Amino acid sequence: MKLKKIIPTIVLFALLGAVIFYHEEISHFVVKKFIYRNHSVEAIQANEYALSKDYHFVQITDDFVAKDYQQLLNIFYTILDSGVDSFYFYCDDAYDSCLEDVDDLIPDGQKDSALSDLNNFVHPYNTYNTITIKSNNFGKVEVVIEKQYPTDKIEEVNEKVKEIKAKIEKDGMSTKDKIKAFHDYIINYARYDKDRAENMNHPDFKDSTTHTAYGLLETKMALCGGYSDLMAIYLDTLEIPNIRVSANNHVWNLVYLDDKWQHLDVTWDDPVTTTGEQILIHEHFLISYQELMKLDAVAHKFDENIYVEAK
């Protein structure tokens, strides 16, 4: 009789043990496959400055599960282009190096980040100053962005650009003439910030804003970032496709006009003189890649795998 009572008990414990074991496995499966993998990402809500343009290097995407490095770049580009302050996406199970690649995109210091090139493909108002990344073991990546242009500065620049447009744009002007008029206005209005350029790491220039469009307009001084950002903002008001091209220590504009991409370097058309005299030239105004290389192939040496349109 005792043996008959013991056997069901052993069987019961054995069954309970099996249930407990498989419950743990099933819980992990549910978390990983249903909560994590099938968690939908809300559609990204782009702001009014989103350009939504596709290029050779990166394209806008609505798939926020990174399956390879290119898709990872596309996701980051889409996030930046949209102008959101935060967003999240996932790494695909099969993309084993995804989180490592995310970390490699944003190294310590951020200024030399691989993502800095993506800034050049979006509207200046949607460019980042810093990016913070959080990720977990389930492949979820959260992105938090601090913008280069605060809201009050955007309003300030927009108002000033509107005023400039009213001054320089005349009836009957071609698009090229309008760009030239704005090019000339910037050069006559501002000077290259030579002191800051030669002392970039000096504490006296820690709070300088001459690398931005609002810094140029407020101080009448600019680095190449200020010149190229302000030109890009104006070009976008004309709905002309454009990107900013970066070399090691320089940035300028690339403009799609008359069915071709052309280089426009406002900085180099505003040369620094020993006498302090203001000079306006047009050597770098809407020229071809070949013409640009003849003028200077060193300062304008860019990564042709990134800025494919610039070749």
Image (tube, rainbow, N blue to C red):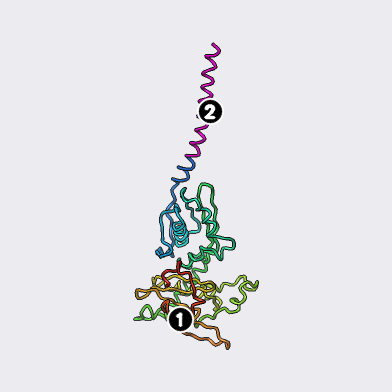
Q: Residue at x 49, y 71 (%)?
A: 246
Q: Quadrant of the C terminus?
A: bottom left
The kind of residue on which mark 2 rests is Gly
Please report the bounds of the magenta region as a residue range. 1-29
Q: Secondary structure at mark 2?
A: helix
Give residue 81's position: percent from left, percent from top: 45, 62
Q: Quadrant of the N terminus?
A: top right
Give residue 152's position: percent from left, percent from top: 52, 67
Instruction: First in sequence, mark 2 or 1: give its number.
Output: 2
In the image, residue 281 sits, relative to residue 145, either above or below, namely below
Q: Is residue 23 magenta?
A: yes
For the residue pair 23 and 193, the one nearer the viewer reads as 23
For the residue pair 244 and 288, the one nearer the viewer reads as 288
Q: On the image, numbered disc 1 is attached to which residue? A: 294
Q: Residue at x 41, y 60 (%)?
A: 60
* Most common secondary structure along the magenta stretch: helix
Left or right: 47 with respect to 273? left
Q: Secondary structure at mark 1?
A: helix
Q: Residue at x 50, y 36 (%)?
A: 25
Q: CA distance from mark 2 to mark 1?
A: 78 Å
Give residue 141's position: percent from left, percent from top: 51, 52
Q: On the image, numbered disc 2 is attached to which residue? A: 17
The kind of residue on which mark 1 rests is Lys
In the image, residue 214 sits, relative to residue 94, either above or below, namely below
For the residue pair 10 and 158, the one nearer the viewer reads as 10
Q: Is residue 286 magenta?
A: no
Give residue 173's position: percent from left, percent from top: 36, 81
